Amino acid sequence: MYQIPAFLVLLCSSFLFIVPHVEGFGICKRSESRPMDRLVFGTVGLPNVPGDGPLQLLDDAYERGFCRFDLARTYGAGKSEAIFGQWVKERNIDRSTIKIVTKGGMGNDKYGNPDREMCTHQSLDSELGASLEALETDYADLYMLHRDDLRIPVEEFVNWMNDLKSQGLIRRWGVSNWSLQRIHQAYTYAIENNMEPPTGTSPQLSLAVPSSDVWPSTHSLSCPSKLEEIEWYREHGIEVMGWEALAKGFMAVPTLWRQHEIDYTTFHGPEGELGSNLWRLQRIQRAYCTPQNYERRRISTKIAKESGLSLAQVALLYSLAKGDHVSVLVGADRTAHLDEMAAIRDYSLDQEALNCLTAASTKSSLVSKVANELKSWTLDDTKLLYTVKNNKNKETPSSASEEFVNSQPFDYSIFEKFENKTTSGETVFS
């Protein structure tokens, strides 16, 4: 979503491409490779690649089968789109072999300010026109509203996006960082009026569950409680395209921001200047550096070590396991990273590993409890609220499930009581 400070780029670049050598615990070989379009090449960092590096990196990605590219008008203040357009033109890329995803609607706002100048039909037309010109193309395969604006009725957005589609400027439309409630409203309005509904949503989606909004006006589906929401999108033909799948390097570099090195006193202010490296670091660490996420990283690192994969690969496999309608944005600044990302097409995490990572624990009693609790949830399609499934053959739903439902949005601390109540020290793996 945002440009990574240079010192973080260097840290994140330290993970190397690892060729899997065996199927270890938690990893299984797929009978068929995943479609390459579920790995979307992220371009937010393209302007930071020196010299002719950006064009060569795009060459390398294209040669390895990457065919979908995520862009936005705000990335590098338009530089990412310009670089990509230069690549398309100079390399004479066959347009039919690539899918362009770009985003707009934020105007000059770079950080998701809810009080920014309001988007209008005219300003959206202008932004898309600028994007298409820079991208050297006549249309976007998927055009997304980069942020929601609660001051604007969803009906207006639906009308505007359908107008762009009727002009042939976009093939599909979607949203980024919108809540389920607003997407549901947009979808319902479009269907009831014989219009094209949104077919894509781009939230934060990672193995690392953020404890707060990573960036202003963003939305996350990483929390285990969001599984039913992700399923709702599948049932309604909406792709989930997750950003920050590696949590700004936290789920790529096992030694990044080690728990004993974090200065937690900086988490709650005073905040650094808007847009500064300090401001970014504070928001990233506040969101991702939690006890549960450190435990997920520890488990993932062990799975990676035993299977011959990397931590980054395990983390991406976790997000992809959320459903066949889920894709992930993957960034790279060197060819080795591209090889690493492409290799995950042939692997999956088994259910045992998924359950451990979801519960952020290897204690079998806790892992089982978490899995059972999540299975007891269902999403009311009308009210868009979670309820506990009624099962006539079972006892009354547990108090923990009731507490889940009554504490929406989901608070992971509810699970902490289970750890204190466990009677067995048995672990799924150690």
Image (tube, helix red, strand yellow):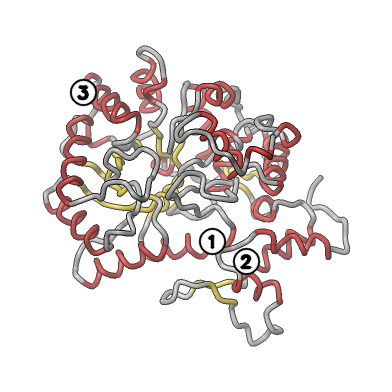
Circle 3 sits on which residue? 89
Q: Residue at x 32, y 67 (%)?
A: 185
Q: Does residue 107 appear left or right of residue 311 in this picture?
A: left
N-terminal label among 3 and 2: 3
Q: Residue furthest bottom?
A: 392
Please, which residue is most extreme toward the left here? Answer: 167
Name the amino acid, label 3: Lys
Spatial separation of the CA atoms under disc 3 and disc 1? 41 Å
Badge 1 amino acid: Leu
Point out the image quarter for the C terminus: top right
Mark 2 lies on residue:
374
Classify 10 Å Cα crowding around label 1: few (below 14), some (14-19), many (20 and above).
some
- Return the mark for residue 257: none
Q: Secondary structure at mark 1?
A: helix
Task: Point out residue 47 in the picture as x, y percentages from the top left corner.
Answer: 37, 23
Residues tagged 1 and 2 counted as in contact (Cβ below 8 A) = yes
Is there CB contact under 8 Å for labels 3 and 2? no
State the residue position of label 1: 227
